Amino acid sequence: MSNDNILKAILEADVRAYLHQESDFAFEMQTLQVVTGEGFVCRHGGTYRDPITDKARQFDIRASLVEGKNRLLLAVESKNLRATSPLLVHTIARTSSEALTEVILRRRDVIVQTHPQRISEANSLYREGEQVGKTADQVSRKKNGDFGRSDGPVFEKVSQAVSSSHELVRETVSSAPVPSMSLIVPILVVPDGRLWVVEYGPDGAIRRGPAAEDSISMFLDQGWTVPGQFGPVTYTMSHLEIVCLAALAAKLRELRASMDGLRKGAELFNLPGM
């Protein structure tokens, strides 16, 4: 029998190497440490009912940060991509119709009212002309040397982040403090060096890249409709954030810093009760 076919015992050093290099849960815990380190209150590893499939699923992290009337809510999923299958995101310039951010306002006039408010580009997180992801592939090589391409594993994690956000929308519409303004953002965290971006021009030709990046926004335009006190409420998440672990803290601070600008955008509508 060939020595190659003899199974070798897994020793402590092997288990430690696995935890350091391959363990999905260990990477998830590293992500959780960064999020909590930025002051967010986190729920970790709970279950929820998928609003599309109606099946029970598990989320990685749901995080919240409350500062005065501002509430930043995150649905965070981590994907421990291997060096042999990094993520390649294809981007184009964001159009004016995609340069939007929605928040959920809870205010008291004569009665408590809950409604989404779309923030114009001047105060939006996302600006016209910036590069925005439209699709993504995991790039790999087959044993015969040909390229392999798949978006299945990453798409599953993206779906989990977006579906987990549904529960955050429902909770916000039904029970957020009055008055308050809430922003809900899905985030996918990947290991450092595993995110590549290629930019396309209006003619479809590659304009820049591929290049390794720390983060990129992907356009979603995902709306969730949930029951409200006076009828259904629909909130649209315009983008998903894809972030490398080393850049996650900076991205969280960026989102946190954006809340005052979003609030100014909402206040331009002179809404009473806020």
Image: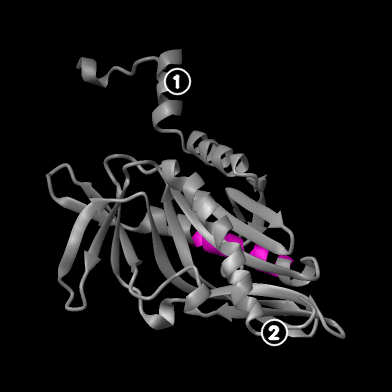
Q: Quadrant of the N terminus?
A: top left
Tag 1: Cα neighbours inside 10 Å, few (<14), some, or many (≥20)? few
Contact, mark 1 vs mark 2 (Cβ under 8 Å): no
Question: Which sits in the foreground, 162 or 15?
Answer: 162
Q: Position of residue 191 (x, y in %)?
A: 39, 42
SS for callout 1: helix
Which quadrant holds residue 181?
Answer: bottom right
Question: Which sits in the foreground, 1 or 153?
Answer: 153
Amino acid found under the numbered disc labelled 2: Asn
Q: Earlier in the sequence, mark 1 or mark 2?
A: 1
Write down the residue under mark 2: 270
Residue 16's disc number: 1
Q: Position of residue 142 (x, y in %)?
A: 19, 46
Amino acid found under the numbered disc labelled 1: Arg
Q: Which residues are magenta?
A: 159-171
Indicate yes or no whether the magenta region holds residue 166: yes
Tag 2: Cα neighbours inside 10 Å, few (<14), some, or many (≥20)? few
Q: Position of residue 145 (x, y in %)?
A: 12, 45
